[in-house]
Image: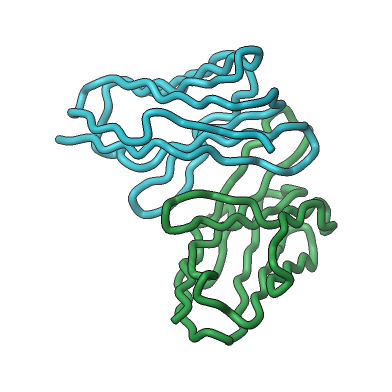
Amino acid sequence: DTAVSQTPKYLVTQMGNDKSIKCEQNLGHDTMYWYKQDSKKFLKIMFSYNNKELIINETVPNRFSPKSPDKAHLNLHINSLELGDSAVYFCASSQRGQGSEKLFFGSGTQLSVL
Amino acid sequence: GIQVEQSPPDLILQEGANSTLRCNFSDSVNNLQWFHQNPWGQLINLFYIPSGTKQNGRLSATTVATERYSLLYISSSQTTDSGVYFCAVERTSGTYKYIFGTGTRLKVLA
């Protein structure tokens, strides 16, 4: 039973296309995140949502649009893909205020823009 | 913004050896976590440790928040410990913004 699942695992696409990555968590957490990992393994936060409300937008180009239809889902839509968008995108979730606010990550989506 | 530096950047060990990984942060933090990214890319949460010491099997972690560092100890290392270890800090509780460190790449040789 996967706690945080994201699809697809691999995404290969041409420059200029639009694509989406989906994320779902079954942990009952109230906060979800998108992180980007570059080729040097550096992990940087992009967005965080708490109870479906956007809390952090970390100077991400507006070609990236997150959407949270409910607390268990956080999707990421990317318009007009560029070469520099190639990276691994991770979804994560956590629960505030219960003494252990561990981040749980999905398995990542490797995006390759050609 | 807060800087999170990890050392060493790379580490090679023989199976059975012990090691200490360090995470330094430039400002006070409310929360700190350690992660292991295995060779298949999966990020696994090892510890939630804003302060004090915790142990889980062969791994233990200590955070001294007042001195702005955390340590991850790996004892009797195994080849399955290979991967990249990250610490991540949250500057202020409730900001929902964890900043990741630069990582330590560990390779354990059989």
* Vertical placement of residue B8 versus A79, above or below: above
Q: Position of residue A71 (x, y in %)?
A: 78, 58
- Position of the C terminus of chain A, as image quadrant, is bottom left
Query: Residue at 53% of width from left, 21% of height from top?
Result: B70
Query: Is residue A8 in view from this perspective?
Result: yes
* Vertical placement of residue A58 versus B17, above or below: below
Query: Residue at 67% of width from left, 54% of height from top?
Result: A33
Q: Is residue A32 left or right of residue B10?
A: right
* Vertical placement of residue B46 versus A75, above or below: above
Q: Is residue B95 left or right of residue A102?
A: right
Query: Residue at 30% of width from left, 39% of height from top?
Result: B82
Query: Is residue B81 in view from this perspective?
Result: no
* Vertical placement of residue A55 versus A64, above or below: above
Query: Residue at 48% of width from left, 39% of height from top?
Result: B102
The front one of A95 and A86 is A86
The front one of B108 and B8 is B8
Q: Position of residue B86 (x, y in %)?
A: 48, 37
Q: Position of residue B9 (x, y in %)?
A: 37, 35
The front one of A20 and A78 is A78
Chain identifier matching the cyan colour in the rendered picture: B
In the rendered image of the structure, the colour used to display chain A is: green
Report the number of numbered marks.
Answer: 0
How is the model colour-coded? Answer: by chain
Q: Position of residue B62 (x, y in %)?
A: 52, 17
Quarter of the image where one finds residue B73: top left
